[in-house]
Image (cartoon, grey):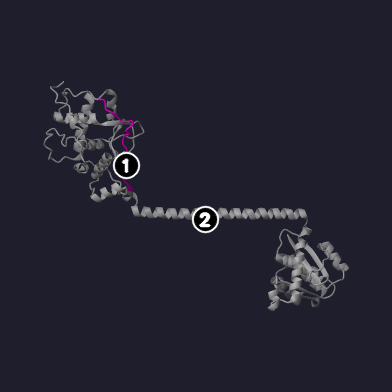
Amino acid sequence: MGAYSVWHPRRSTALTETESDYNISTFNFKFRKAVNSGPGLALQGIVRGPICSSTRTELAGFINAIFAPGPVHYACDNAAVVKQAQAIIRDPFQKPHKPWGIRRDGDLWGVLQHAICSKKPTSVAISKVKGHATEQDVLDGVAERCHKDGNDASDELVSDAYKLHGDGLLSLTNLCGTRHAEYTEFMTACIHMVVDIYKTDRDLRARIQAQQNAIGRGPKQLHNIPKSLGYADACDARSIGLHDFFFMPKDFTHAPAQCYRSIWAFLAVLRIQPVDPPNVGITWIELLVIYNLFGGLHDLSPDGHASVPCKRMQTTKQELMQFQRLTRAVVKHFAFNHDQKLFKAPPTTGKRLLPLGFSNHAAKLAFLPLLDDLQSRQVTKALLTMRGKFTRGHAANLAAGSLCLPRVLLTLRRQPRWRTQLNVVDTISDRLPPPPQGCH
């Protein structure tokens, strides 16, 4: 929505017939007196159309001023209008380089050129004045007093010219303008939020990438090792149901009697919590480490002796297989029926030792033993020795919770070294049954 005003200082005559006909048919107008410039004639009008700019309103005012009787000297504060209008005045009959119809605001420029040709170019002039001049500008000689008063009067009059659009249209445009400003503020906030999210995401990705580069990729990628694995809850733990060891079964031929008695005593002192799928129970290798932690025999081989530690080096696989054979035999003959199923492989596919960096499967059972925090940490350190190298630095980092290691395959071909990480507390000796009197 555009409006303009033309101030004729010291003009007291009314509009001429031609001037009146043009304004009535083209523009709205009314009379007004300037505040500080004495009597004069003020013409106010509006510029209709879907597109409006300061250039179009200045052109509308200039065209309106040309129809005044006599020579016209128009003062304008728009430099672009002044430059183009002066070029037309110098040669009003010269055709433009581009037709007015394809130029911006060309419709009004064409009307202006026709008006100048009709009035005679020598009777029309236009000059550039400073817009919104201040008293200091007048004192400094930047603007003249008459130019300041005329520009101020036009600016004051143009504020009232907007009312010629009608109250309804003004209210509608003000509402649209307010909503547009609010929508602009809302979209600006949305854009800032999107930019902040992008920056945060970029920084997070860069930090993750830096961490990824530090810990490596693929098989060499490091993983944080927990201080211990999860074991049974004390509230749900119970003992394994066992019959008394009062006889020696005939099939107990894979090791001396003290080995079977030691296994029976271990199962007697062990407290467990049964687990159901898909939960994962303890592995056989963990159970073997716990057996040693509770003071079990170091040598379970057929020619071993409880009083003399075995000096013959066995692999972890050999020792584990012997422990499994003896434990299953004891469970078969002495465990209650409902507890014998706990020592069978559960139908789960979870990798119990994956948190410790072992990526392959290990044989599991259907229960979890009850261990305190110190015992569970010792079992974790004992299992980590199966990686082949576990130094004091590794142990210190594990205790601090900052141990990071790549994943490897659990191999049982190495010699058992976990006993160096165990503080053995002999709880099995107190539960050892007396030697049986014979076979059954």
Q: Residue furthest right?
A: 17
Looking at the rendered structure, the secondary structure element under dot 2 is helix
Q: Quadrant of residue 310?
A: top left
Residue 330 placed where, x, y %?
A: 21, 27
Q: Looking at the magenta stretch, what is its main secondary structure? A: loop
Task: Please report the bounds of the magenta region as a residue range.
Answer: 223-241
Q: Is residue 357 left or right of residue 148?
A: left
- Is tag 2's residue or tag 1's residue first in the polypeptide sequence? 2
Q: Residues within 10 Å of mark 1 (few under 14, many from 20)?
A: some
Judging depth in this view, the residue of 327 and 236 nearest the camera is 236
Instruction: Tell me, yes or no, if residue 94 can be seen here.
Output: no
Residue 405 placed where, x, y %?
A: 30, 48
Residue 115 placed where, x, y %?
A: 80, 70
Query: Is 229 in the magenta?
Result: yes
Query: Is 2 in the magenta?
Result: no
Query: The residue under label 2 is which amino acid type?
Result: Val
Q: Is residue 194 above or below residue 123?
A: above
Query: The residue under label 1 is which amino acid type?
Result: Leu
Q: Across the whole image, how many numbered discs are drawn on residues? A: 2
Q: Is residue 130 left or right of residue 197?
A: right
Q: Is residue 170 above or below residue 259?
A: below
Q: Residue furthest top?
A: 440
Residue 370 placed where, x, y %?
A: 29, 34
Q: Which mark is residue 28?
A: none
Instruction: Tell me, yes or no, if residue 281 can be seen here.
Output: yes
Which residue is the site of mark 1?
Answer: 354
Q: Is residue 205 above or below residue 100?
A: above
Which residue is the site of mark 2?
Answer: 195
